[in-house]
Amino acid sequence: MAKVDRDVANLDDGVPYIHGDARRPGIEVARLDGPHRHHLAGIEPAAASRDTPGMKPSIALRLLACLALLLACAPALAKPALWVVKDADTTIYLFGTVHLMPRDAGWHSSELDRALADSRTLYIELTDDDPANMAALVLRYGMDAAHPLSSQLSPAEAHRLDLLANRLDVPGGLQTLNVMRPWLAALTLALTPLHKAGLDPEHGVDKQLKAQMSAAGKPVLGLETAEQQIRFLADMPRAIELALLRSTMRDADKGAFQLTELIDAWKAGDVNSIARIGNEDMRRREPKLYQLLLVQRNQVWATKIAAMLQQPGTVFIAVGAAHLAGPDSVQARLELLGVAVERLP
């Protein structure tokens, strides 16, 4: 069987994320030419920071930032933003998550813990993210041995891909990438350095919230399915897939040190900076993807949240932090539906 490591996502929260076994960063699949196995990097959500002089962040990293903002190892006290929607007999908390983080990162606050304790149900982006299901979906939607990736690129681009795979230590090198669809190869290149840096999906915020609520005997439900999330990427037109790959090839080895500003914004609850860094570039440079991965999903979620107000009780909803930032956020969509949203102090 194939095995996917981790939880795009959440292009980021934007791009969907995929969880799985975090012990080894990759998908394990049988080689086409024998019984040996290669490890293919999984589809981790990642984040990129704003442009720096002489450096253009890759579209892949920008897209991933829309699903999941990564938490740094710094011990500074974090207080991510928390919102509430309520009426006479219903309370719904909204919280932005990061899907990948180091083992020793802290992010709880007293306000957050009270909201969790008061809530009877947790909603996260997806719950059917077991490794077997993820592996089957990635093999179905992310692999294309009949059309080798290098054949879809120019000779110079194929050579660049080979060099980059070796420099980033992608297990199996070009042979691994060559059987992937362009979108999966792009995320593999973007995320391999982050896996090597020790960022672990098993310690992501959504995973921890799920474990905490499950241990308390409270139900945990998904807003989407794993197949829906993967198909947000797999259904992209091939031209956009290849543009994503080419951008990532230019900048894939720069993402690990571009994250500081975005990370600090999440830890500080600086939603304006999250929107500026994580969302604005994709909205401007890839408007169709922005609509698909962020705006349309936020609209669907807002409609579901508005409907939840018809049932009494307290609910906690945790989605990628970029979905709760900017003019097209879930909160903005709720306001358009006539539902007031309040940010808690």
Image (spheres, rainbow, N blue to C red):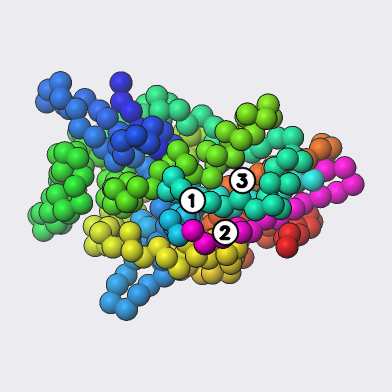
Q: Are marks 1 and 2 in contact (CB under 8 Å)?
A: yes
Quarter in which the N terminus is drawn: top left
Q: Residues within 10 Å of mark 1 (few under 14, many from 20)?
A: some
Residue sitting at the far right: 88
Instruction: Tell me if residue 291 can be seen.
Output: no
The residue at which mark 2 appears reads as 78
The label shown at residue 105 is: 1
Judged from the image, the secondary structure of the residue bearing numbered disc 1 is: loop
- Residue extent of the magenta highlight: 75-90
The residue at which mark 3 appears reads as 318
Question: Mark 3 vs mark 2: which is more N-terminal?
Answer: 2
Q: Nearer the viewer, residue 110 or 317?
A: 110
Label 3 vs label 1, nearer the camera: 1
Which amino acid lies under the numbered mark 1 shown in the image of this protein?
Ala
Spatial separation of the CA atoms under disc 3 and disc 1: 18 Å
Question: Mark 1 vs mark 2: which is more N-terminal?
Answer: 2
Residue under the image location 45 percent in, 60 percent down: 74
Q: Nearer the viewer, residue 255 or 213?
A: 213
Q: Residues within 10 Å of mark 2 (few under 14, many from 20)?
A: some
Which amino acid lies under the numbered mark 3 shown in the image of this protein?
Ala
Marker count (numbered): 3
